[in-house]
Amino acid sequence: MFPRPIQQSSAGVQWLYTIALPVALLVWLFPLLGVALTSLRPASDLAQGNYFGMPSGIAWENYIYIFTQTPIGQYMLNSLWVTLPTVVGAVGLSLMTGFALAVYGFRANILVFFMFVAGNFVPFQILMVPVRDMTLQLGMYDTWYGLALFHIAFQTGFCTLFMRNFIKALPYELIEAARVEGVTEWRIFWFIVLPLMRPAIAALSVLVFTFIWNDFFWATVLTQGVDSQPITAGLSSLNGQWIAQWHLVSAGSILAALPPVLMFFLMQKHFIAGLTLGAVK
Amino acid sequence: MAQAAQMASSAPDVRSGRRWNQRTVAPWLFLAPGLFMFTVYVLWPIVQSITLSFYDWNGLYNRDGEFTGTFVGLGNYAELMRDPAFDTSLWNNLKWLVLYLLALPIGLFIAIFLNQTVTGIRLYKSLFFFPFVISQVVVGLIFAWFYAPNFGLFYLLTEAITGKGTAILADPDLVTYGIIVAGLWPQIAYVMILYLTGLNNVAPDQIEAARLDGAKGWRMLWYVVLPQLRPATFIAVIVTVIGALRSFDLVSIMTTGGPFGSSRVLSYYMFEMALGEFGFRMGYGAAIAVVLFAIMMVFISGFIWKMWRDEKER
């Protein structure tokens, strides 16, 4: 193990480490903690210049205010409406593409695979004008499905990479054996491979959920109104209205951050398996 | 399908013939929906954008639904060469690229710091990872608050040290660095997780053997541990470079490219040109996107090349 386990060090060093851990964490998360505290600070404190001292009270009303006086609840729902179909769509499509690329040795296989991988890394700007134009032409501009369709297509690239590698790592004898038994390809996919894919599906679902929930660029390009704007774009426009009302900005930020944070804490193991692309074994 | 069945029945061995056919057709059936979506929304738009970069177009169609752009050849690119805003964006992208790579050593440092087995360490690791899970919009707002003039912590800190507060987001010379620091926060967290996973898999016997030979500290890290972390380092470099070149959210949230356009990057400048307040210059925007795409392709090709080599070794 590297570095040497702290238990083998002198008592002094161990003691130092125990202190250093929480201190380092506090420094690391300091900006976030500051915002979390500001979100609960009464507006009057800020007006008096009390930004960092003891708050004069805990102001849940900041949260009540943004829920009742701004469309933040609607924005969050919009986000959910874009995110959930994208998760289902991208994971579903990539299960099939990943299966095709992992199991069959046809000639164009590696080419198609690399195309998905490369596409996943292109800058969004090279897609922006045509995708926006197409979405407008199809009458899907400013709708949740217009945004979700794009996300499904784009995320399929990343998901295919992951699914393909995951299926490749499964024992191929399973598929061979089924073929000898005369099981059709579709049934092999459905009854043999799919049940083994649960960890991969879980990993990709949490990852895609986080990516899409946090997406800002496409939200700005493909939506504009309160009726369909996701929380990231909504928060950005609210920020424009709340000039220097930091207690509101903070409360909004905390709300926007909450769903992916919860997702991460509930599904931590899967999340990290997905992020390391399964490549750092 | 009917055709496949027909071909199968004419083959000498009916069963294996049909199976063979099924196996040729099946991959394409499985690929079809995903490939279709990917082609429509990713591959084809790339071709369209490249074409569009040779046109002057305001994004509109005439009453008959015809494209209204005019062909200008390399005009857009020629204009880019003379455009000082493009120059600034390109330079800022370079700053992003170089400084973003600081995420690697810092991420590795934190990973080594956290790679212990003491009570509660798992929670510490997750909490250190936190910034990456949060939307960049929120990260941008958090840092805007941190940098805010007069009361922001950073401002107060510089005031305490130098006697004069620095409003970093209002200073044309410093603003880009301020945004990059905000971007580094989640990026370091990502790199840290990659290295933590990597450190977990470093062969213990090699470490022990090196230790018996008297290696420790830096020499151990450099000669024994880092070579074993190469897969993690590779992915970390790729995601960091891509992240640096994709930087859009933070610039948009924290400064909208200002002050005086000094914090623009290519991705943001492209958006400004195509959809911003300066009007809809789609062709010019597309040309900027093509330049960004070309830069990105260098790194993407490297990644694909490495993957291809690994595939062949298998």
Image (tube, coloured by chain):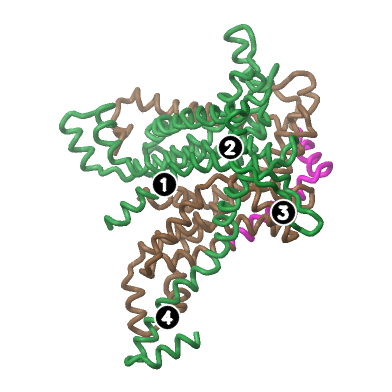
Asked if labels 1 and 4 touch by Cβ distance under 8 angstroms, the answer is no
Colour chain A is painted in: brown
What's the residue type where badge 1 is placed? Ser
Sequence-first disc among 4 and 1: 4
In the picture provided, is A224 more to the left or to the right than A218?
Answer: right
Q: Check residue A106 for magenta coloring.
A: no
Q: Chain of mark 3?
A: B
Q: CA distance from mark 2 to mark 3?
A: 21 Å
Mark 3 or 4 closer to N-term?
A: 4
Q: Secondary structure at mark 2?
A: helix
CA gap between label 1 and label 2 equals: 23 Å
Circle 3 residue: B67
| Residue A262 seen in render | no
Q: Name the chain letter of the residue that bears numbered label 1.
A: B
Q: Are marks 4 and 1 on the same chain?
A: yes
What color is chain B drawn in? green
Tell me which residue sits at (59%, 39%) in the image. Answer: B288
Local packing at callout 1 (Cα closer than 10 Å; few below 14, some 14-19, many 20+) is few
Which residue is disc 2 drawn over?
B77
Farthest top residue? B163
Q: Amino acid at mark 4?
A: Gln
Letter of the chain that mark 4 sits on in the rendering: B
The residue beneath circle 1 is B301
User: Does residue A82 belong to the magenta stretch?
Assistant: yes
- For label 4, the residue is B22
